[in-house]
Each structure stands twice: as structure tokens, then as C-alpha cells.
Amino acid sequence: MDDKKRKAHDLLRSFKGDNYIHGLGCLNRLGEQTKALGRRATVVADGLGTDWAAPIHEEIRVALASHGFALAGEFIPGAAPNAPREDVFRIAQAIALQEPDVVIAVGGGSGIDAVKAAVAYHVLGDLNSELMDYFGTGQVTAMLEKSDRRLLPVVAVQLAASSAAHLTQYSNITYKDRGQKLLIVDEAVVPPKALFDYTVTRTMPSDFTMDGGLDGVAHCLEVYFGAPDNLVNTVKPVALLGIYLIVSHLDRACRQGDDMEAREALGLGTDLGGYAIMLGGTNGAHLTSFSLVDILSHGRACAIMNPYYTVFFAPAIEEKVRNVGALYKAAGYTSANLNRLHGRDLGVAVAEAMRNLSEWIGFPTRLADVPGFTDEHLERAMTAAKNPKLESKLRNMPVPLSAEMVDEYMGPVLEAAKTGNFAGIKSIPMEMQASR
């Protein structure tokens, strides 16, 4: 194992300790990881009935049986992409019928997010039947304290190098009728135990690999860019190592799915993205991505938006932008002399490097090239940015915005992402920037 990967393992160990088992060939340790939480398990699993998932499901059955677990019922199908709220309700009802001691979520980010929300709804739904009330920061904890109830423990078994939902306090749920994703942010939904066997990601198709990898980059990038002075030294080694591992290995993993060296790097990099978003919060690109859910995967939406937000933020966070640019330069995605560039010019050079990576792996780099995109998506994104349930994303920006500033400053960023032209992006005057 090289020094970068060893450092990533060390960082994750400091983050989760024995509550997280990860690496190559560790799925058979699921029973060991789960045994302290109960003996009657409900399993909610992605990929039921598919060839790629069948061996994984069988290994899970064996791992649980070997530690004396009884299944509370048949495996419950996981959620569709983007975790529609209808799947949250269905999974919550199925959990209620099985009456388990512990819930094991086996899936990618959407599957795990849906289980997090479903477990909360299973415990609290009789008192709080409107799912909308669960979104925002700390709402689930407040409901639990008021009702004197506890959530069923969740063991999250991650199958995809992407969102790191197995490690975090986030649950992203989609209202398909509105074309809008909303977010639970709550320590109560962090899975108390998690496991990720990076070898299972060899079955991830190249498109999914790209989406997941650039979702991990977005987590690291946005948290690092938005980290205030009192957190930046903690965030920096986590975020920059995560970006390095993903950016330098993503192309290899996409081109040769069974390259386990690259797959391990992506798993570690996206896990560090999960660590990053528990240290700080994401901001602009994530906020906008929630309004593009009907036309783009989450990782792809963030990959499109982050270069444009980088130009917007660059005058306020020059050193951070230069550090990120150095990682893209080392991976061969720019030849610019970043040390000679400053402010907006530096932001444009690093944004171009980010777009070069996207182009290399076949991603779109502007919204106008995305099938189904219309100006209504921009209007939806502007409206969502003013939603109090998503205000944390505005506060987490390196140049924090208020709802009243969205039209003047976010609007040009979105328009630039539509056309691919950085020229219209406005910078906030230094005297108006809130201290970070």
C-alpha cells in the first residue's frame, strides 16, 4: 500500500474507529460488525434479482448466519436513484412489518439515504406524518427528544464509491412531483456501524463510476473551499487527499473496471469526502444540483456546477483554489502556471482544469448540453436557494450569501453554467464579504 492510501486509512480510522470496517475483501465481516446491535435483522438491499448483486447478497446472508443472526423477513428492495419519498414510505412500512432489532442497508447512496429516512419515519411517523417536517438541520433529533424515542440502529453496507452516505448525517430525498431534492441534516441518522468492501465496486458501470467519483470530489472541494479559518487546518489534509486519490485514479477506474488499485483509491477518496462533509458543509454546486435531479445524476450535476462556482469564489479563497489546481495539474489536466495567477484569473484556470477532466471522461461541461435542460431549471434553483430548509448551503459558501443576494450573485453563476462562458460571473466586493 502506498503512502497516500495508508494516510487515507489512518484518517478514516481517526474518524470512525472500530465503527467502520473498510478495505479490500471485508464483506465477510458484516456479522462481526453488526453483532453488538441485535440479533433480528431486516436487510434492505439494492439490486435484488440482478446478476451483479446476487453474489453480494449471498455473502451477506452467510456473514449474518455465521454470527447467529435471524433474518426478520425477506430482503426488502432498496430505493430508486435519488431516493424518491415514495420509497421512503414503502421501506418504512416494510420495516414495521418485520419488527427487527437492527436494519442493514445494503446499497449505494440513494439506497442508504432512503433507509436513514425510512427508519426515522418508522419510529416517528405516527406522531409526525408529514415527511417535509423532517428536512433541515436537527429536526429528527428534536422529534426524538420530544417523544422520548430512539431510532432503530442502522448498519450501512456501501456498494458504490460515491456519496459516502454510510458515514454521514445526511439523507437526500427527492420529491419527484416537484423535481426537487431536499435534505435531512441530523446526527441522529448517522449509521452507528458501517462497512465498505471496495472490491464490490468492480461491478460499477463506467458512468456510475464517473458520477460517484466526481460526487466525492465535490464533497472534498466544497467543504475545503468553505472551511472557516478555525477549521481549515483540520479539513485541508482530508479534502486535498480525497481529491488527489479520485482525480488521479478516476480515468483508470472508468477504463478498466477491475483495476483494484484504482478502485481502492476511489473508495478511499470518496470515503474521505464523507469525512469532509462531517467536518464542514457543502455549498453552491450541491445546492444547485438539488434542482437538476430530473435531468442529471447528483455527481454529474455537481461536476458541471463546481467550475463555475470556483470562478465565483476564487478572489476570496485564492490559496485554496491554487492548492486544488495543483492536484489537477499533477494529474495532467492543466499546464497553466498557477503560481503566477491570482484572483479571478486563477479561478478560471482551475475551473478549466476541472472541465478538462469532465471532458476527458465524457461528461458535459455546461447545462445547455444536457438533454431536457430548460431555463425553468435555473428558476427552480434560484427558488430553492431561498428555501430556509436549504439555507445551510448558502451559509457554507466561501462568500456566504443571504437569500436577498441570490438573484444578483448566484443568478450569473447559473447563467454561466448554462452557456459555458465564465465572463458574466460577478465577484462580491471584498468589503461585502462576510468573514470566514
Image (cartoon, rainbow, N blue to C red):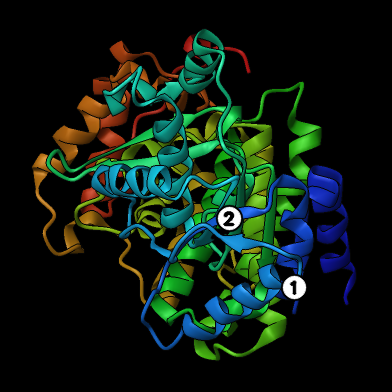
What residue lies at 20% left-to-right and 57% top-to-bottom?
295
Query: Picture coordinates of residue 126 (x, y %)?
Result: 34, 23
Residue at the spot x=54%, y=19% of the render? 141
- The vertical placement of 107 against 152, above or below, is below
Question: Is residue 389 at least partly visible in the picture?
Answer: yes
Give the residue pinned by disc 2: 41
Determine crowd level at label 2: few under 14, some 14-19, many 20+ residues with C-alpha closer than 10 A: many
Three-letter residue code for mark 1: Ser
Q: In which quarter of the image is the N terminus?
A: bottom right
Residue drawn at the location 79% of the way across and 52% of the way down: 12
Closer to the camera in the image, 1 or 319: 1
Q: Is residue 131 above or below residue 277?
A: above
Occupied quadrant, residue 277: top right
Q: Name the residue under label 1.
A: 66
Question: Is the residue 376 above or below the residue 348 in the image?
Answer: above
Which residue is at 24% across, 22% downward? 407
What SS does tag 1 mark? loop
- Towards the viewer: 20 or 284: 20
